[in-house]
Image (cartoon, grey):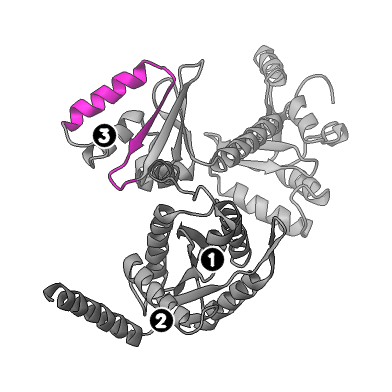
Amino acid sequence: MGQRGHFASALVDDDESAVFRVMLDHLPVGICLFDRDYRLLAINRLLVDMLDFPSSMFESSLPTLEELTFFNALRGEYGAGDPHEQTHERMALARQGHAHRFQRTRPNGQVLEIIGAPLPKGGFISIYTDITEQKIIEQELRRQSEVFQTLVDNIPGGVTLFGADQRLLAYNKEYARLLDFPPELFEENPTLERFFRYNAARGEYGNGDAEAQVQQLLQRARQHQAHQFKRTRPNGTILEVRGLPLADGGFVTIYTDVTEQHRAAEAIERLAHRDMLTGLANRYTLEARLDQLVADAHRHDRRLAVMFLDMDNFKAINDTLGHGIGDQFLCEIARRLSGTVRENDIVARLGGDEFVVVLAEVADPQDAATVASKIIAALNQPIEIDRHALRASASIGICFYPQDGRDRGALMQSADIAMYHAKNAGKGVFHFFNAAMMIAASKRLELERALREAVSQQ
């Protein structure tokens, strides 16, 4: 094959044909023409090289479409299969005479875009473009996009990227979830204004004129300044919003749900949460945490246990050995109590020698009995303080949510009553609360009231 495109002899070798030949061989695409009988009229060198056709196929005469197709089928251009069947199928499609456009990947990985169109007097022209490099670039861009989206989706918060024209370029699922945005809001290349209007319409920005709110927000966005603030949604969720402008005029915004952190910070501000002597939770912390545990137990249909402990012999130790020894004694009691329960349970000191243990979740009452036995055994071990060998003893009252009380106050009262029954039973033991104890306590209070009245009337 020469330096020019090959032409069938039916084409006249005149000046017009010469121009056509030069043009054909200088086109940046592969091109071929077939007559109405599917005989090759012309093909340029670029297409011969592109399809790796041997030059010998075009030296004596030009092949037919069927011969070229069969040649390709024999060398596996169309994948596995019978070459005759593959050729037959492709010739049947060609005879339909329809314009077509498709892409084909060759065995060597080369990707071709093929555009074919019928000619006015029969036959057709096909244009081949090597788009391999374009496909590689597209694949790399797609890979980079997937990597970027993976990174965005794994950021612990909602993320948006808006362009300089305030149109959304990227976002993650957490953004849609945090703001409760429906999928249709993200259709058709949405603008920042669309999100502002949706939020204003549903009251996200509080009471007021929705249009005024939108315009104010758009004006703030046009200032293109870094910002950070907190916003409380109508559902109580507290979002921290941080915006960072980009050099190209766009900006990135990160939304973080700080509801729990905010509530925790408020709780810490309210509470002096530790007992100064023992480091255990104090009464205020106990009450707050017990309220939460009761709410959780109610929500998840769980049982919890409350234990009220009173040291049987602390007064004697404190009176005979002094407050210093007494304080060290209480600290050791606190350490041993903490060592008998789980991390999510509560150990608190109410004051003096009174302690409370809350078991956050118990499957069976026997579990609480087992823990109470462990506490008594731990406290019975000798305590060495300044050469004094001391022994601790505690009376323990136990009650359960929900059968012995459905709120903190009722549970503390039931555990306290059970503790006094344990102390009256001989100390160093534990008792479970029952309804009879409440009746007995009520009778005792009534008797004490009657006695006080009788004495006052004498």
Q: Position of residue 202 (x, y in %)?
A: 23, 42
Q: Residue furthest bottom?
A: 436
Q: Which residue is mark 1?
A: 316
Q: Position of residue 326 (x, y in %)?
A: 57, 57
Q: Secondary structure at mark 3?
A: helix
Sequence-earlier tag: 3 or 1: 3
Q: Secondary structure at mark 1?
A: helix
Instruction: Name the amino acid, label 2.
Output: Phe
Based on the picture, tell me whether residue 132 belongs to the magenta stretch. Answer: no
Q: Is residue 312 positioned above or below 107 on the image?
A: below
Q: Which quadrant: the C terminus? A: bottom left
Which residue is pictured at 41% across the width and 74% down the height?
A: 415
- For marks 3 and 2, the one nearer the N-term is 3
Q: Would residue 6 be seen by someone viewing this image from the given angle?
A: no
Q: Which mark is residue 197?
A: 3
Q: Disc 3 or disc 2, which is closer to the eye?
A: 2
Is residue 240 placed above or below 179 in the rendered structure? above
The residue beneath circle 2 is 433
Residue at (50, 66) in percent of width and height: 357
How far is disc 3 from disc 2 in space, using C-alphas? 59 Å
Residue 215 position within the rendered picture, expressed as x and y whole percent measured from the top left: 24, 23
Label located before the other in sequence (1 or 2): 1
- Relative vertical location of residue 112 with respect to residue 97 in this rendering, above or below: above
- The CA distance from mark 3 to mark 1 is 73 Å
The residue nearer to you, when weighing 445 against 241, is 445
The secondary structure type at the circle numbered 2 is loop
Alpha carbon separation for disc pair 1 and 2: 28 Å
Decide which of 413, 442 is in the foreground and name it. Answer: 442
Judge left or right: residue 33 versus residue 271: right
The segment highlighted magenta reads: 209-236
